[in-house]
Amino acid sequence: MSKTILITGASSGFGLMLATQLHQKGFNVIGTSREPEKYKGKIAFQLLRLDIADDNSIQAFAKELFSKISTLDVLVNNAGYMVTGIAEETPIELGRQQLETNFWGTVRVTNALLPYFRKQRYGKIITVSSIVALIGPPNLSFYSASKHAVQGYFESLRYELNQFNIKVSVVEPVWFKTNIGQHSVTPKGNEIADYNNYRKKVNALTQKGLDDAQSPEAVVNTITKLIGTKEPKFSNPVGKQSGMIVFLRSFAPKMFESTMLKSLDKF
């Protein structure tokens, strides 16, 4: 019997590529989107309505999901978006919305499904985090904060769920070619003159990261491997130089900080 895999945010980016690949491999894939009707006839797997920032939507979704399936093998938390911009220039409300979706939305979806996982006494929860959950790059303060929160929450949760044979992992990609950059939100009209020169440099650095990003197959392959692994690792950095970033941040923090600061001098 094929495994049933739920992927949030499956209408584009990592989610779409992962869902399509798993469907082609014979898994029973269920994806989510805020507007599933837009993709009717365009994708091969089931797509259910879900807005992870809306409690009513989450409860309605969980009820619909388990009217269609009896067991759930894997939850892949993938839905989210990115706020960019200088920290001081970013309105608090915009930062709050970033955490409301990326962190609290992910937590709410997970909590809505945990009773079903506990009842069946097995399952996997894989959450797409980011390399910025392990570092704090400029221009991504609230996005980084949301991913740090995700990282800490699921690291604690994995211990609590281990007794139920529910395995918890996070995947921390570096820059990859998806639509996250195109759909990012950047505040306008709050520019502070003292940051003008720095803002130009950091925007150029961010854009270079997006322009030089890798194809997302490596992330999809990592998640697919975690699905098939009996005892998956918790933390799974993915992408070019991800291992070096983690090593320097952990064991040579001064060198890492120096490298980050010098990277801006190239612009």
Image (tube, grey):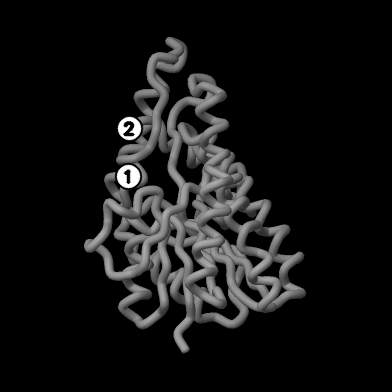
Q: Residues within 10 Å of mark 2 (few under 14, many from 20)?
A: some
Residue extending farthest left:
41
Q: From the image, which quarter does the C terminus lie in?
A: top left
Q: Nearer the viewer, mark 2 or mark 1?
A: 1
Please say if 195 is above or below 78.
above
- Could you say which is closer to the camera, residue 131 or residue 180? 180
Residue lying at 43% horizontally and 10% vertically, measured from the top left: 193
Q: Secondary structure at mark 1?
A: helix
**On the image, numbered disc 1 is attached to which residue?**
210
- Could you say which is closer to the camera, residue 125 or residue 148? 125
Is residue 73 rendered to the left or right of residue 116? Answer: left
Identify residue type, mark 1: Leu
Upstream in the sequence, badge 2 or badge 1?
Answer: 2
Please say if 73 is above or below 214.
below
Q: Quadrant of residue 196?
A: top left
- Residue 262 in the image: x percent, y percent? 45, 35
Residue lying at 27% horizontally and 51% vertically, measured from the top left: 38
- In the rendering, which numbered label is found on residue 241? none
**On the image, numbered disc 2 is attached to which residue?**
204
Residue lying at 61% horizontally and 58% vertically, measured from the top left: 110
Q: CA distance from mark 2 to mark 1?
A: 10 Å
- Residue 25 in the image: x percent, y percent? 35, 81
